[in-house]
Amino acid sequence: MVANRKVLSGNEAIAHAAWAAGVSVASAYPGTPSTEILETIAKSFPVGAGLQVPPQQESIYAEWSVNEKVAMEVAIGASFAGARALTAMKHVGLNVALDPLMTFAYIGATGGLVVVCADDPGMHSSQNEQDNRALAKFARVPMLEPSDSQECYDMTLLAFEISEEFNIPVILRTTTRVSHSSSIVDLAVFERRPRGERVYEKDMTRTVMVPMFARKMRVELQGKLAKLADYTEKTPLQRIERGSRIGIITSGVSYQYAREAFADASILKVGMTFPLPKRLIREFAKSVDKLYVVEEGDAYLEEQILAMGVAIEHPSISLRIGELDPDRLERLAAEVYGLPPLKPKEAVGNLPARPPVLCPGCSHRGVFYALSRLKAIVMGDIGCYSLGAFAPLSAMDSIVCMGASIGNAHGMQKAGQAGRVAAVIGDSTFFHSGITGLLNLVYNRGASTIIVLDNRTTAMTGHQDHPGTGRTLMGDQTVETLVEDVARGVGVKRVRVIDPYNLEETYNVLAEEIDSPEPSVVVSKRPCVLADRTRTFQQHRIDLEACKACGACLKLGCPAIEVIDSPDADAEKRKTRINRVLCVGCGMCLQVCKFDAIKETSL
Amino acid sequence: MSKTLNITLVGVGGQGTLLASEILCRVALASGRDVKKSEVHGMAQRGGSVVSQVRIGEKVHSPLIALGETDILIAFEKVEALRYAHFLGPDGIAMVNDQEIRPVTVSSGQAEWPEDLDGMLRSTFPKLEVIHALAIACELGNVRAVNLVMIGALADHLDIEDSIWRDAIAALVKPQFVELNLKAFEAGRAAHRSASS
């Protein structure tokens, strides 16, 4: 075979495999660390593969679905039609998509269906670190766990084969360090598999899950699992690397850390982690003197191995909470080999923190500035605007999950919470799962104010399109759904649209709506400054003669406004200046200065 | 088997550390070595502290480098060099761009900027190489070329053919910036050579 080697991230490798596997339909909602799978599919194929083939026949139809549940349902529809389909999501996305998956596991795949689920141990960019391996077992669908980009490629291809051989959806489970690490992938003969012979065949007893048919398919699923239990013992996805009498069972990226820290140990690397290869595990356990389980997250492997009655060692180094890394494995290895504990390497202390912040000119700032002045209790949601919770704005009080803000505000109001209560939610998040919450609020005679921070993009994950942008993932023009139309459509009578750069209007409208006894929606509309490249502007400067060092401009929390170093360290009040590299001329600071010290300037 | 070379690149979101680490990966692949790179996406565009790790060797397993096992720390900003100092091994080299970027915690008065930053760098890193990448990039007329100046300086430490570097740079930057980036690369390598000779 010819070598065709590239350095690819795990996500890029999965996208390449989707093309080679002949996937017809790919669907996802953006979510770190899974986003680049669909972006790569849309950007790179078929053009990136160096093959000029007519679209529709040979390219992948790829879409940003409005949420993960819909993405899963779209992939299921494609599978019904006999086509191969891939859907990708972050770990919490699978919670949203679990409903269709649980029942489709009974029905089973016609065309191969692979669900890529990217977990985020250590919560680099997530609100929890749930270990979704439990969900494969829960839904009774096979799960493969790659440990690097080559395995992402190979296992995605194999996942489609398994899905069609056993007529069952397959989960490919990655983690942040698999999805976002890059390594060499040999694509070998990189050719697209032609669409197979599978077609939709009408048989209500297999596809209509009313109880009488669901009971039959539940039994059939058990039969598939029995066959898979046999398959998992024999597949080359399970690999034993023979070494010393110290044995390690591991999977995913944990294998890479373990292989490095325990260079001479025997390792059973489990590539298919549901169902587990129980015979192989017993044989491996017998072949070693001491057996360790190295896994990131929950005790998924450990509990099942213990339930088999196989004895494993319990070291004092816990691998449970947070992300695994080479340091934790080195400490574990020191304990296993009876070496002195490693000396912790000390970091340099007292360095100024460099946290992420709302960008200069961020359109969310105007709304949070007003909410801060209104002293409102603000139920928050998932997006860049989570940064509005931090000082000096300090204007967000909760983050639970996508779309939660609306139900949370409604519940607080019904519980009789004193004071002003509002919800903020981004445009993409509103389309994802805010609409049902809003409908519920109207139906149940709520009184909350919902502020939709409409910056015309899915900003946090890197500017993806959504139903409000008028453009699809594949770059086609489409209907531009307006948040204000949706709000009126579900029955909201008070709907206002504001420009968050206008601070007075923003404050007045928010005060009026929050204090009104009816449900209301305020759409704060202004494109994300990072995405809007067409905008022209005048930067600002501060006239130091006029500046009275009152600090009003600092309450905006704009990174472009800096306190000037004072020779007198005790001086409580320090004048400010505007960083010309950072300022994008949004003009909010100009509106808060009472001394007319801030002026427009030409470069 | 020769030892794996561990390189950690640190800086501030927007400084181009990701492109620099991508160039390293491509160079490693073209020179017949195994390579792994690890980085975290998401917050980088929001002005936060960013770190990217590249490991090059015969066979690389872990995509992450253990604390204290980095061979070369490439810092695009001085405070970021100190923030990741404990990543570096006892014999490790710190290559630090002579540039300071103050975070919002300092500009808003919540935190203090270290008084004697250069002194701290000297006492923290026994093998410190200060690279005037910002000044060199400005001379070439584009601040954004800082990353290629740093890569040029790093290239002086590695035994890799010139053509491999040039091909990797040409493949990864936009056509209109290839010439500028190649110049920045050469200038970085030349500056490092004259400083260490």
Image: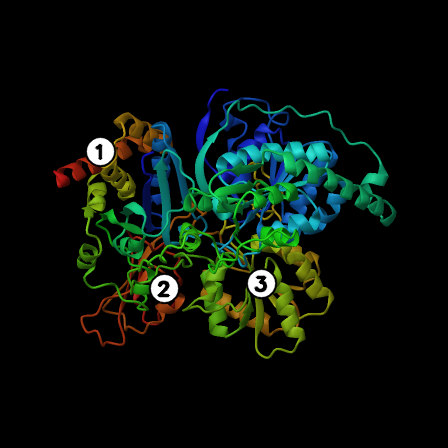
Amino acid at pointer 1: Glu
Measured in 3D between alpha carbons, the distance from the residue under mark 1 to the one under mark 2, in whole angstroms, is 45 Å
Q: Tell me, yes or no, whether the two marked residues, 1 and 3, touch with CB atoms within 8 Å.
A: no
Q: Tell me, yes or no, whether the two marked residues, 1 and 2, touch with CB atoms within 8 Å.
A: no
Amino acid at pointer 2: Leu
Q: Write down the chain letter for disc 3.
A: A
Q: In the image, residue B109 lies at what x, y percent? A: 30, 68
Q: Which one is closest to the eye, mark 3 or mark 2?
A: 3
Q: Which residue is mark 1?
A: B186
Residue A17 in sight: yes
Q: Write down the chain letter for disc 2.
A: A
Q: In the image, residue A92 lies at what x, y percent? A: 59, 53
Q: Secondary structure at mark 1?
A: helix
Residue B63 in sight: no
Residue farthest top in this picture: A1
Amino acid at pointer 3: Val
Which residue occupies the foreground of this view, A602 or B133? B133
Q: In the image, residue A360 lies at what x, y percent? A: 38, 57
Q: Within the image, what quadrant is residue B148 found in?
A: top left
A504 relative to A108 in the view: left or right: left
Q: Which residue is mark 3?
A: A400
Q: Secondary structure at mark 2?
A: helix
Mark 2, other Cα within 10 Å: few <14 / some 14–19 / many ≥20: some
A500 relative to A62 in the view: left or right: left
Q: Secondary structure at mark 3?
A: loop
Residue A590's disc number: 2
Q: Are marks 3 and 2 on the same chain?
A: yes
Q: Are marks 1 and 2 on the same chain?
A: no
